[in-house]
Amino acid sequence: RLTTELASEDFSLALDVLPSGRPDESTPSPPEPTPMPDIRPAADEFAPYYATYVSLVPDGDVTATLASQLDETLGLLRPLNEEQALFRYAPGKWSVKEVVTHLTDAERVFMYRALSFARGATDSLPSFDENAWAPMAEADHVSLDELLDEFDAVRSATVSLLAHLSRLPRLARARCPH
């Protein structure tokens, strides 16, 4: 579920008051990914901070999960109008548009990290402070359709990258330098 992917109680609360939608038949799905092995990382393969997030990932092919979540996410958010997309469930909390931008930004950051690991980079990776990044994106001044198109493009690129990486046997158990 989207709320599981986000692991965010805040976003769950916001979605409870918004209309739910179904995937739009005209929204193209990303190409079918090459199945990725069902390999859950061991606790020593990621920083302790990420343990909760790792535990929330469903068993099975992660590329298939990401592809299906794209359809689910777009189906949930495309029916919203601009006023609904500006909704904040409390003062100081992110709008729906800011959450979409955060998802897109975070996906880019994590896929850059995955690519770095896959290419054997040994340099330190930059940190990611979503609370510093959010206001800089000015997401509330961009149309929801543009934000969702961008998320769609980034997620499709993620699925493609992971499908490619899954075909490289040497990456079956790539180690994260945390």
Image (cartoon, rainbow, N blue to C red):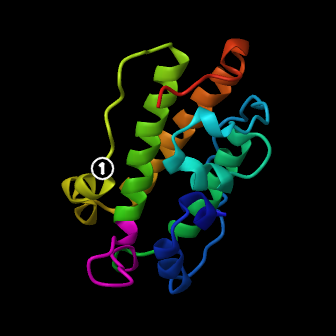
Give the x, y percent position of residue 82: 35, 74
The image quarter in which residue 71 lies:
bottom right
Seen at 41% across and 38% down, the residue is: 109
The residue that appears at 79% across and 36% down in the rendered structure is: 38
Tag 1 residue: 129
Q: Give how far across and how far down residue 86 sits, in percent.
A: 33, 75
- Going by the image, does 69 lie left or right of 91? right
**Relative height, residue 62 to residue 27 (above, below):** above
Can I make out residue 150 in this image?
no
Give yes or no for residue 62 being in the magenta stretch. Answer: no
Of 60 and 52, which appears nearest the observer?
52
Q: Which residues are magenta?
A: 84-97
Q: Who's the residue at 68% across and 36% down the image?
A: 41
Q: In the image, is 75 to the left or to the right of 142?
A: right
Q: Is residue 137 above or below residue 86?
A: above
Local SS, label 1: loop
Q: Quadrant of the N terminus?
A: bottom right
Provide residue 23's location: percent of width, then percent of height: 65, 63
Q: Determine whether 38 is above or below 101 in the image.
A: above
At label 1, the amino acid type is Asp
Task: From the viewer's side, name the closer residue of 124 and 130.
Answer: 124
Q: Answer few, some or many: residues within 10 Å of disc 1's Cα (few below 14, many 20 plus, some between 14 and 19).
A: few
